[in-house]
Amino acid sequence: MNILVINGSPAGDNSITLQTALYIQKYFQKHSFSFINAGRSIRQIEKDFSESRKAIEKADLLIFCYPVYTFLVPAQLHRFIELMKEAGMDLSE
Ligand SMILES: Cc1cc2nc3c(=O)[nH]c(=O)nc-3n(C[C@H](O)[C@H](O)[C@H](O)COP(=O)(O)O)c2cc1C
């Protein structure tokens, strides 16, 4: 299964939350994992959503991985979900 982890933390590769996803990756070695640092790279992703679109289309499973910042998901992840909607992505299958 192709699993795409969408990391909402602005801490990017240094994210504590991401370590949980990396643990899951180690635990489920038969599956293929890829990662998008949506929190860290949101400005770049806003300019060009094509790589994210490809990664999402290829995925069988999306994992949204994020810390709580001020009682909410990070605004960068919220923006990423907006971009998914703006791109008209169909996640129904
Ligand atoms: C500005 C800021 C706001 C935070 N707000 C909350 C919060 O409202 N509730 C909570 O439980 N933790 C809060 N935290 C703690 C983070 O969720 C926690 O440090 C988390 O492990 C950070 O994960 P990351 O390294 O993946 O970004 C906050 C941390 C920061 C820096």
Image: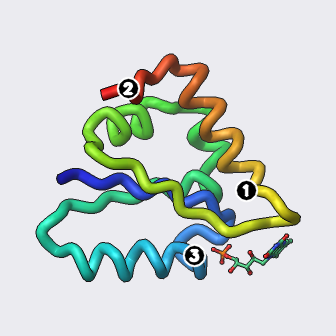
Q: Earlier in the sequence, mark 3 or mark 2?
A: 3
Query: Residue at label 2?
Result: 92
What SS does tag 1 mark?
loop
Measured from the top left, where is residue 41 in percent x and y? 60, 52
Q: CA distance from mark 2 to mark 1?
A: 23 Å
Q: Residue at x 37, y 38 (%)?
A: 56
Q: Earlier in the sequence, mark 3 or mark 1?
A: 3
89 on left or right of 46: left
Q: Residue at x 65, y 31 (%)?
A: 82
Task: For marks 2 and 1, give the one nearer the viewer.
Answer: 2
What's under tag 3, amino acid-wise? Answer: Thr
Q: Are marks 3 and 2 in contact (CB under 8 Å)?
A: no
The mark found on residue 73 in the picture is 1
Quarter of the image with the C terminus is top left
State whether residue 66 is above or below residue 89. Answer: below
Q: Quadrant of ligand 1?
A: bottom right
